[in-house]
Image: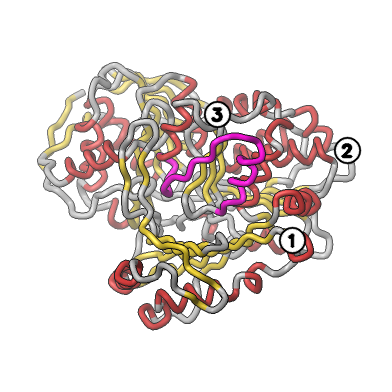
């Protein structure tokens, strides 16, 4: 087998975003495009020769083609072993689990998460470090810098590796081991949760649930764990077969895109519990019978009830949330006497806190929740955590949430997404907000009085790195907040997100509709940003 050195030239725009490099499939299929980025990863890393690399993805279109290229480049780079999921499949949390369990040097995960798939859809690639979490900014910045200077890449001239069966083979001096993509992850889940209690809940005769895998990566995981190991009836997992185009759907578990599940859970014969996960398995949506649990409330409820699960029986070291996420979990942390850290958006910011033993649970409002069991958010883990709580409490989902509000108060919270905006228009909204930000302090808007506004920056308490420009915050003297951010997860145009939050301590007002409860703040957000005038949009694309 011969290693070829292939001449190339840099491509513009290979800067990793919040979770790696995401582009349209057509961009990745350009000659040398994928190879340039992979070689840039290897060029930045050091001392990986003879070490283990983990490779897998969410099964979307181009996944297996890209994996064959990566395997041959990893062999050319000198990795001693590559662990790859059977069929090229590894959910993002499962990849983190495998990296950690097998003490791998790192891993390459192929996914565009909740973005659409297929030949005309999106594709993505990111590098995870040895702790199982996304590479920190110092590494992704170095990768980007290398992509702008690259002149060649190295690849082994070899036949493709069969990926359909668990087996070992070799590419040159590198051992390629095709592994069961589910087993390590399922064993980890069984060590964290009370499977006997959950099995009793699912087989007691009075409890019904549905899990929507959205034709994405969690189908095999959910079938193995929910239906085989926990005994849920066949068919509990719907849309269970991963498809390259996710069945033509948009694998984002929210009220808009997970409409199959939403129709069931809000129907006349609704099950007791519903959940969904996204393209790569790291997000979750939780539903009760005709009842939606916001991701921010879900994080707070998991924190408040954590000791019901065996893996967290000794309590939590601390909690972390992304800045735009509701402050509901802050109230739980305060009541439990533990630290609550506010970080920028992006799971990589939680990794240092978990590695330093400062936090156990963490979450983001974008349907991502997780703990220190891996270093990624984890959709199916959150579902099992909820099932553990339901099995212990013997109450409906809605009752658990309302009792939580009665004890801690309710943080009314919503996110308005304006997707695929013209980039110039979206940047214009943010530029305008920056220009007026300094003059907002002490301004009276309707019944609200602005305490301060800023552009959020974060100093990591572990390595003291500084991240700036993380979102504009407008905070009112009663604690209400409006946050504006440009998202880093899209591949086309720009996505502007507006987060709006207000705290209500009085139980008698907890039953209000969220959009009605926040109506004055929504109007203030629209007025301050001038979003309709600057983008031409009359309404958000998605409201959660």
Where residue 271 sits in the image (x, y, percent)? 80, 53
Residue 212 versus residue 144: which sits nearer the camera? 144
> For this view, does 472 lie left or right of residue 396?
left
Residues 311 and 271: in front is 311
Residue at the spot x=44%, y=69% of the render?
442
Residue 204 - label: 2
Mark 1 closeness class: few <14, some 14–19, many ≥20 residues within 10 Å: few
Q: Is mark 1 on a helix, strand or loop?
A: loop
Instruction: Determine which residue is flagged by label 3.
Output: 373
Q: Where is residue 81 in the image (x, y as percent from the top left)?
A: 35, 20
In the image, which residues are magenta? 326-348
- Residue under the image location 50 percent in, 30 percent down: 358
Residue 227 appears in the rendering: yes
Mark 3: which secondary structure?
loop
Q: Earlier in the sequence, mark 3 or mark 2?
A: 2
Q: Is residue 539 left or right of residue 148?
A: right
Residue 506, numbered circle: 1
Say whether disc 2 or disc 1 marks the residue closer to the N-terminus: 2
**Is residue 195 in the magenta section?**
no
Q: Based on the displayed image, in which of its 4 quarters is residue 46 positioned?
A: top left
Mark 1 and mark 3 in contact (Cβ < 8 Å)?
no
Disc 3 to disc 2, C-alpha distance: 29 Å
**Mark with earlier residue (3, 1):** 3
């Amino acid at each position: 087998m011969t290693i070829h050195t292939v001449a190339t030239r840099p491509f513009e725009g290979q800067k990793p975003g919040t979770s790696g490099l995401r582009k349209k499939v057509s961009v990745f299929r350009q000659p040398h495009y994928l190879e340039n980025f992979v070689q840039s990863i290897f060029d930045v890393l050091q001392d990986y020769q003879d070490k283990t690399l983990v490779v897998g993805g969410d099964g979307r279109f181009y996944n297996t083609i890209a994996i064959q290229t990566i395997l041959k480049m990893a062999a050319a780079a000198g990795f001693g072993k590559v662990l790859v999921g059977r069929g090229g499949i590894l959910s993002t949390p499962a990849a983190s689990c495998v990296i950690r369990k097998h003490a791998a040097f790192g891993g390459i995960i192929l996914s565009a998460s909740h973005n659409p798939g297929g030949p005309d859809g999106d594709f993505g690639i990111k590098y995870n470090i040895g702790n199982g979490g996304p590479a920190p900014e110092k590494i992704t910045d170095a990768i980007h810098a290398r992509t702008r200077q690259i002149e060649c890449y190295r690849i082994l001239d070899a036949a493709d590796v069969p990926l359909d069966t668990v087996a070992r083979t070799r590419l040159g001096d590198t051992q390629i081991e095709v592994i069961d993509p589910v087993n390590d992850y399922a064993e980890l889940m069984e060590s964290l949760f009370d499977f006997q209690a959950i099995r009793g809940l699912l087989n007691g005769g009075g409890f019904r649930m549905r899990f929507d895998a959205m034709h994405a990566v969690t189908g095999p995981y959910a079938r193995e764990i929910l239906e085989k190991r926990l005994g849920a009836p066949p068919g509990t997992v719907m849309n269970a077969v991963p498809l390259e185009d996710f069945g033509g759907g948009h694998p984002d578990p929210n009220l808009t895109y997970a409409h199959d599940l939403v129709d069931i859970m809000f129907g006349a014969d609704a099950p007791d519990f519903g959940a969904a996960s996204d393209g790569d398995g790291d997000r979750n949506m939780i539903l009760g019978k005709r009842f939606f649990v916001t991701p921010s409330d879900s994080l707070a409820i998991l924190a408040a009830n954590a000791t019901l699960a065996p893996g967290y029986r000794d309590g939590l070291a601390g909690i972390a949330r992304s800045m735009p996420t509701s402050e509901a979990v802050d109230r739980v942390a305060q009541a439990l006497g533990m630290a609550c850290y506010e970080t920028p958006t992006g799971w990589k910011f939680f990794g240092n806190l978990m590695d330093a033993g400062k936090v156990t649970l963490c979450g983001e409002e974008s349907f991502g929740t997780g703990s220190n069991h891996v270093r990624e958010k984890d959709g199916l883990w959150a579902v099992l955590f909820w099932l553990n709580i339901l099995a212990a409490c013997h109450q409906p989902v809605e009752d658990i949430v309302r009792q939580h509000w009665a004890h801690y108060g309710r943080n009314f919270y919503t996110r308005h997404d304006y997707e695929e905006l013209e980039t110039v228009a979206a940047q214009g909204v943010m530029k305008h907000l920056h220009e007026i930000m300094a003059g907002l302090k002490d301004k009276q808007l309707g019944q609200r009085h602005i305490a301060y506004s800023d552009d959020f920056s974060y100093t990591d308490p572990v390595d003291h790195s500084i991240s700036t420009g993380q979102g504009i915050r407008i905070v009112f003297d009663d604690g209400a907040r409006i946050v504006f951010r440009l998202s880093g997860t899209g591949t086309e145009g720009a996505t502007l997100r507006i987060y709006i939050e207000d705290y209500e301590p009085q139980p008698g007002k907890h039953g209000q509709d969220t959009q009605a409860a926040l109506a004055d703040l929504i109007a203030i957000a629209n007025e301050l940003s001038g979003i309709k005038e600057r983008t031409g949009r009359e309404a958000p694309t998605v409201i959660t």
